[in-house]
Amino acid sequence: STLDRSSAASDVYKRQDVLAGMEIEVTGSGPDGQRKLSGPIGLMGAMESEVELIQSCLVDAHPIEGPCPLVGGRLDGTDVLLAQCGVGKVNAALAASALVQNGASCIIFTGVAGAAGPDLDIGDVVVGNRFVQHDADGTAFDDPIGVVPGEPRSWQPDERLHTVLMGCAARVFDARRRVVSGTIASGDQFIGDPAKVRWIHDTFDALAVEMEGAALAQAASHLHVPFAVVRVLSDRADGTAVIDFPAFLAQAARHDRDLARAVVAELSGGVPAV
Ligand code: ADE
């Protein structure tokens, strides 16, 4: 119930207060409005190849027990918790919960996505300003397509974190790449079909398609933790996706590391790392 949820959320805040003692402060919208949260910055990526370069930058790295590989440490002097959530919506939600239980003050997801906007190409960057689950289907009960019963039609990221990610992406990537803000559509499906990606774009106005962002959004809303998502486009989510996606992963690891360092520097008030 709502009551249970908000008391669970205030327990989370209490725990975060206990775990506080850090220089960063992120404004999150908790059950009683805007509150200051403090604690390590939560960083999340889906695949090992995407988080391993971030992990190699951590000082005093130590693994933390839980439902997904979680590593605590310092990135350029700032406390972070790094989660390798695995692929898909359930894994993203589990990792979000694990990060919050271990004191994360916010969650930043870095990773790759398929291009869903017709004007976007491989290497362009989408920062999510709206998240939908394209595979949710309660239309048998006249729910609109993409709506999880009992959940909102879409989710939005923390405004400040979204702004920070837009700035970091613009700095990290050279000017030939587009950095756009738009809808990210998530589902437990790797999209490699031009008709399907067109449907996702036309139905949800999505610019990027991936498998975790909107699940993180849903979980973060229940956990009352601010979050944001940045995705570099690795493929066009059409017939060529199965070739382009794995080919892009090595580059993606470097992008994820550079973005993570830039975001952490900015949130901790330091000098951007790149
Ligand atoms: N992540 C990267 N490319 C993707 C695609 N085409 N579909 C789903 N998730 C992706």
Image (cartoon, helix red, strand yellow):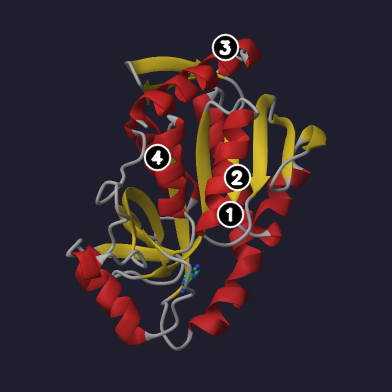
- Report the residue marked by disc 4: 167
- Residue placed most toward the observer, 126 or 215: 215
Q: Mark 1 Cα within 10 Å, few/some/many (few <14, many 20+)?
A: many
Q: Looking at numbered disc 1 in the image, what kind of residue is underneath it?
A: Asn
Q: Which residue occupies 37% across, 64% down?
A: 208
Name which residue lies at 57% across and 31% down.
Answer: 100
The residues bearing labels 3 and 1 have C-alpha atoms spaced at a distance of 26 Å
Mark 4 or 2: the one toward you: 2
Nearest to N terminus: mark 1 or mark 4: 1
- The residue nearer to you, when weighing 251 against 148, is 148
The disc label shown at residue 95, or none: 2
Instruction: Inspect the image, locate mark 3, and give the three-letter code of the amino acid beneath it.
Output: Asp
Q: Are marks 1 and 2 in contact (CB under 8 Å)?
A: yes
Q: Quadrant of residue 133?
A: bottom left
Which residue is identified by label 3?
17
Mark 2 residue CB less than 8 A from any atom of ligand 1: no
Give the residue displayed 68% in from the left and 30% down from the top.
76
List x then y, in percent, for residue 92: 54, 51
Q: Position of residue 203 (x, y in %)?
A: 21, 69
Give the class, few, some or many, for how many residues have Cα within 10 Å of label 2's Cα (few <14, many ≥20): many
Q: Is residue 121 above or below residue 193?
A: above
Dot 3 or dot 4, earlier in sequence: 3
Q: Which residue corresponds to mark 1?
A: 91
Query: Above or below — where is 89 with respect to 56?
Result: below
Q: Position of residue 172 (x, y in %)?
A: 50, 47
